[in-house]
Image (cartoon, rainbow, N blue to C red):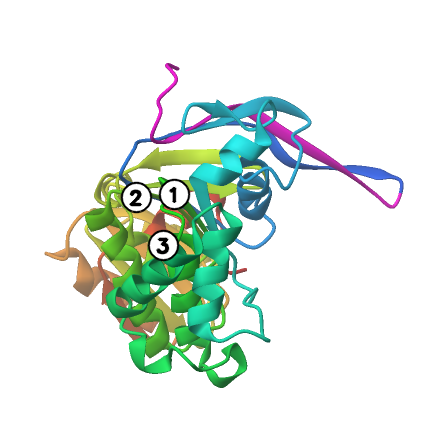
Amino acid sequence: MAVQTSGIIIEKLAKTYARRGAHVQALKGIDLEVKGGEIFGLLGPNGAGKTTTVGICTTRVRATSGRAVVNGIDVAADAPAVKKSIGVVTQFRTLDRALTIRENLATHGMYFGMQPKDAWERADELLKDFRLSERAKAFPDELSGGMAQRVQVARAIAHRPSVLFLDEPTAGLDPQSRLALWETIEGMHDRGITVFLTTHYMEEAESLCDRVAIIDHGEILVCDTPDALKNSVSAETVIELRLEQPDEALVGRLRALTGVVSADATKDGVRVLTASRDGVLPSILSEANKSGLIDLTMAHPTLETVFISLTGRELRE
């Protein structure tokens, strides 16, 4: 891969931790390339290796082998230079509780070398841009979780980094706050900032990201646009059957139906992927009724469908 100066390159990146006398491989030699200016999502369940990847790229974790290059800078060779060119937002509040919101923003700018006058002007600019001006004199503990995360994003870009790392930024937020933060993240496109986002919310990855990589057990399974990934399952419809008496014989009968791409047992019934909705649904209902059909839902494939097809389990299991 050629080195680029406004994105991220990850080559054969591996990380092994020693835990209780055993060695745990958090990353198993992954490769990724994030283009400058795109919003890139790393989607996977908890413990898949997402936070370790961000930790290495932001210089907080040392890789066992391989390399990460951010803005053309090898993170292991020149960590200070990398830190100057990136912003980082975690799912945990890291705002200084003794400072007001305006002071948090200005102090961050000065920490990264801005002159005090410029830092205060930048703080006021960000307060306006992020619709936080009315809360400028508020303290972090007086903010809702969603608003606090918006402040953390604003603070992370106060020194005008070219790459922003967001590690599970909406974890624990209510739906309204999550949507508000999505709008904020989408605004990074207009600022020309490259965004590397980790999440286990499939809706978040589908809504925000230009491209998505799915990671599981420290390995990258696929990487493409959300639409291309959903199309890769070769199904038009996902049918969830909730049954009184699910059994393997039913799964086999459903798989044999013309138009059925796949059928797999779930906790409450069977998940069926079909090439289309035309013609096949009556046959599925006929078979399902033999096992006591309770409920049926139909939807288009999602990134969750992709993850299930690759791993055989749901994203949040």
Instruction: Determine the residue positioned at 38% across, 60% down.
Output: 154
Q: Is residue 169 left or right of residue 301?
A: right
Between residue 232 and residue 203, name the one nearer to us: 203
How dense is the environment of label 1, judged by Cα within 10 Å: few (below 14), some, or many (20 and up)?
Answer: some
Between label 3 and label 1, give the one nearer the viewer: 3
Q: Which residue is mark 3?
A: 118
The disc, 3 or 2, on the residue closer to the chain's N-terminal end is 3
Residue 167 visible, this angle = no
Nearest to the observer: residue 55 or residue 302: 55
Q: Position of residue 315 (x, y in %)?
A: 47, 55
Q: Earlier in the sequence, mark 2 or mark 1?
A: 1
Distance between the Cα atoms at labels 3 and 2?
Answer: 21 Å
The residue wearing badge 1 is 161
Q: Dot 2 corresponds to which residue?
A: 193
What segment carries the magenta color? 1-20
As drawn, which residue projects farthest toward the bottom? 142
Image point (43%, 48%), residue name: 114
Q: Amino acid at mark 2?
A: Ile
> Who comes first in sequence, dot 3 or dot 1?
3
Is residue 216 shown in magenta? no
Do residues under tags 3 and 2 come within 8 Å of each other at their CB atoms? no
Residue type, label 1: Pro
